Amino acid sequence: MRVRVPVAVALAATLLTGCAQSVDPIERLGKKAAQRVHPHGPTREQPYRHWGLTAPLAPAPKPSPWPAPRSAGPGLPPVVDHVRTHDKVVFLTYDAQGTGADTRRDPRFADLVRELRLPVTVFPTAPRHGHFAGLPYATQRSEICGHRPRLNSRLLRPPYGTYDTTTRRAAADCGVSALVLWRASTTTGTLTYARGDHHLTPGDIVQVGPADSTARLLRGLQELGLTVGSLEDYL
């Protein structure tokens, strides 16, 4: 089930925790972000051209049925950096403070998501422990559970992508269904891969940087015949 939040809740107000905030573009960015989006009427270029695309981004298909990701053990959520699917989609994820998805740092991000109607997933972060791995269960559970009820999210990205079995136990006890990592990343300015073949494939989860990185990535996806899907529709 997809996460829904009120229209009036601004994206910047959600940047408090590592739990995912699925951004359904029009509803999730809030009034202030909406006011920064420039209208595109008959005398203005189409939004996709504004971001350097040669055509509108293809809509994502209805998710194809596929077995759920394997859990790490009885009662433990899986850790995923790729979704098994035949659909020609990849999933764009953002760590708000680290990669520029915070609208206070890069206002163009809100414009891009809204104008292109991108179903991105933002993992807000806040000042806290740098890594979960090695911390006591009680500490990890407090960190994970403390903010999740407010965001009502099923997905978690552990800080810096580090975790241990205790993280999985604490996440499961907080109602998290999956820990989300990434197979590819643009946060260094170029597309790098954590494992596997050095090219994007359907189902890849991508950690993306600011608006410019997203626009470049979208152009590359179009050349590969790929589009952007909603991660929470597939997990």
Image (spheres, grey):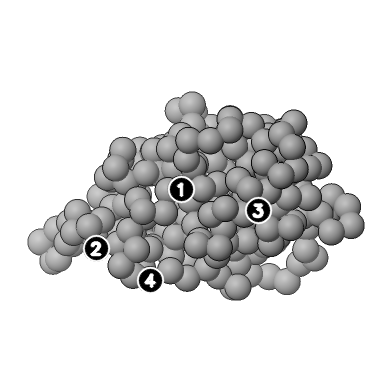
Residue 82 image point, x, y percent: 69, 49
Label 3 to label 1: alpha-carbon separation: 27 Å
Along the horizontal axis of the image, is 190 left or right of 173? left
Residue under numbered circle 2? 31
> Is residue 106 toward the left or the right of residue 98 in the image?
left
Amino acid type for the residue under numbered disc 2: Lys
For label 3, count other residues whose C-alpha is less than 10 Å away and answer few (under 14), some (14-19) or many (20+).
many
Q: Secondary structure at mark 3?
A: loop
Residue 169 showing in the rendered view:
yes
Q: Residue at x 43, y 38 (%)?
A: 97
Above or below: residue 197 compared with residue 218: above
Q: Which residue is mark 1?
A: 16
Q: Earlier in the sequence, mark 4 or mark 2?
A: 4
Q: Which residue is mark 3?
A: 203
Foreground mark, 3 or 4?
4
Q: Is residue 56 visible?
A: no
Label 2 vs label 1, nearer the camera: 1
Question: Distance of mark 3 from mark 2, alpha carbons?
Answer: 32 Å
Residue located at (67% from left, 36% from top): 132
Label 2: how many Cα within 10 Å (few below 14, some 14–19, many 20+):
some
- Taking the spot 22% from the left edge, 57% from the top edge, the residue there is 32
- Tag 3: amino acid: Gly
